[in-house]
Image (cartoon, rainbow, N blue to C red):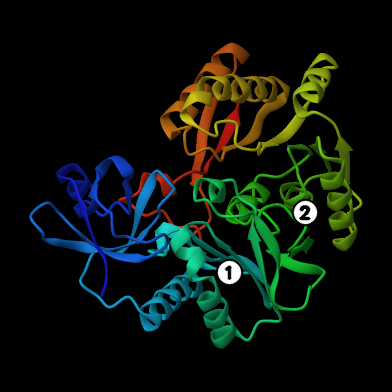
């Protein structure tokens, strides 16, 4: 028999607004719930609200999987996976790597599934999804007959769930280096050793957009493995990519070779230091891309993050030629769009440049935003004309 968990009035209001998370402070009775169990959730009057994954450790005690009275069985989970796939068939174009499941946005909270060619990477980031990991491996195997499935469960959030950090092949054999294709650009990725699940897929459509503005001399900051740089290189005369990681730069050079790129240069350097040096030398660029890591990992770090974003955007605006293009992003959920735009406005004022917003962009469509969960909207990408 399914265990019943009771939540407070505030929690019930949150759930009825279709937010998937209920925090511990809004759970009034969960004494019989087991770690990772799918539980029946009711309000104080005993009225059914839905079913959720229960966590005994996280502050996020409940993660809703349905707001209806449904049997949560293997067929239920399979249908959710098929539904996620239908969206990707509609929106994913010209790539062999994409996000098949994006957690809460696909009503599969704390589950991430990325596809790279005929291989898959999974993350099960809560007690509930981790308990279902073998089932997900079986479903992926049945539906797609993959060459390999890799788990990349090293995320810090698993510590909050009392789960170990693990990674490795869970089905098939280690695929080694894979070469994926994105909009005609080729990239080598390693699903076990690469960043997160192997590559950053959420900027895919923004890289296409950036290429539309590419020309002349371009600078790609925080280039990582060169994805933006190689898109820009298709139209620019010369592209310089910069990253502090020597490993990332080596991979970027490898990716340039895969594409026969002769107009790219990759430099291992601290971006903040290099931007300062380039500005002091009066260097000028027609296009600059800023794609830094998340400066604001929590609310407490937002003010420091704003200072970091301002410094790099201010220097970029100063170095752009008249009518130059700045592509600038933040992947921090805690940095709101309004806050980011305010940083850009302050940067423009200090740089004494007039700046126009040409495009407001977000994460690729295989990372959909659930309107009832602002937490699923994290990537803000602005394409600006600087005069």
Quadrant of residue 51 within the rendered picture: bottom left
Q: Is residue 325 above or below residue 69?
A: above
Crowding near pointer 1: few (<14 within 10 Å), some, many (20+)? few
The residue tagged 2 is 234
The residue tagged 1 is 93
Rendered-image quadrant of the N terminus:
bottom left
Residue at the image position 44 percent from the left and 48 percent from the top: 57
Q: Earlier in the sequence, mark 1 or mark 2?
A: 1
Crowding near pointer 2: few (<14 within 10 Å), some, many (20+)? some
Residue at the image position 57 percent from the left and 34 percent from the top: 384
Please give the label number shown on residue 135: none
Q: Is residue 350 above or below residue 236?
A: above
Q: Is residue 119 above or below residue 387?
A: below
Q: Is residue 244 above or below residue 145?
A: above
In the structure shown, which secondary structural element does the residue marked by tag 2 occupy? loop
Q: Nearer the viewer, residue 195 or 174?
A: 174
Q: Nearer the viewer, residue 367 or 191?
A: 191
Quadrant of residue 324 within the rendered picture: top right
| Number of marks in the rendered image | 2
Q: Position of residue 124 (x, y in %)?
A: 53, 62
Q: Pointers 1 and 2 in contact (CB under 8 A)?
A: no
Residue, far left: 45
Report the Cα–Cα distance between label 1 and label 2: 19 Å
Q: Position of residue 217 (x, y in %)?
A: 80, 37
Say left or right for 3 vs 188: left
Q: Position of residue 371 (x, y in %)?
A: 33, 51
Q: Position of residue 339 (x, y in %)?
A: 45, 27
In the structure shown, which secondary structural element does the residue marked by tag 1 occupy? loop
Residue at the image position 90 percent from the left and 58 percent from the top: 257
């Amino acid at each position: 028999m399914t265990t019943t968990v009771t939540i407070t009035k505030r929690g019930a209001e949150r759930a009825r607004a279709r937010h998937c998370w209920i925090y511990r402070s809004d759970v009034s009775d969960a004494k019989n719930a087991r770690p990772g169990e799918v539980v029946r959730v009711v309000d104080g009057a005993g009225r059914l609200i839905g079913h959720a994954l229960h966590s005994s450790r996280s502050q996020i005690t409940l993660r809703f999987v349905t707001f209806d009275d449904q049997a949560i069985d293997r067929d239920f989970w399979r249908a959710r996976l098929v539904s996620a796939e239908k969206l990707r068939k509609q929106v994913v174009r010209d790539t062999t790597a994409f996000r098949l499941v994006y957690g809460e946005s696909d009503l599969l909270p704390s589950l991430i599934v990325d596809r790279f060619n005929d291989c898959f990477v999974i993350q099960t980031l809560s007690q509930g999804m981790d308990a279902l990991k073998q089932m997900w491996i079986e479903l992926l195997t049945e539906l797609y007959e993959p060459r390999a499935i890799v788990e990349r469960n090293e995320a810090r959030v698993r510590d909050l769930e009392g789960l170990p950090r693990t990674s490795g092949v869970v089905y098939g054999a280690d695929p080694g280096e894979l070469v994926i294709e994105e909009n005609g650009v080729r990239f080598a990725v390693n699903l076990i050793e690469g960043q997160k699940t192997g590559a950053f897929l959420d900027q895919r459509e923004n890289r296409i957009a950036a290429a539309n503005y590419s020309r002349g001399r371009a600078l790609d900051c925080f280039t990582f493995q060169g994805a933006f740089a190689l898109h820009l290189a298709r139209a620019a005369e010369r592209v310089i990519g910069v990253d502090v990681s020597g490993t990332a730069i080596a991979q970027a050079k490898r990716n340039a070779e895969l594409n026969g790129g002769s107009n790219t240069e990759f430099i291992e350097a601290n971006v903040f230091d290099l931007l300062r040096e380039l500005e002091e030398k009066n260097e000028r660029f027609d296009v600059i891309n800023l794609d830094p890591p998340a400066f604001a990992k929590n609310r407490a770090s937002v003010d420091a993050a704003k200072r970091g974003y301002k410094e790099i955007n201010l220097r970029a605006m100063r170095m752009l030629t008249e009518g130059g293009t700045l592509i600038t992003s933040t992947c921090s959920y805690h940095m709101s769009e309004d806050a980011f735009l305010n940083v850009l406005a302050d940067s423009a004022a200090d740089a004494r440049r007039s700046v126009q917003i040409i495009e407001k962009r977000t994460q690729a469509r295989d990372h959909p935003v659930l309107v009832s969960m602002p937490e699923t909207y994290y990537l803000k990408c602005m394409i600006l004309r600087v005069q």
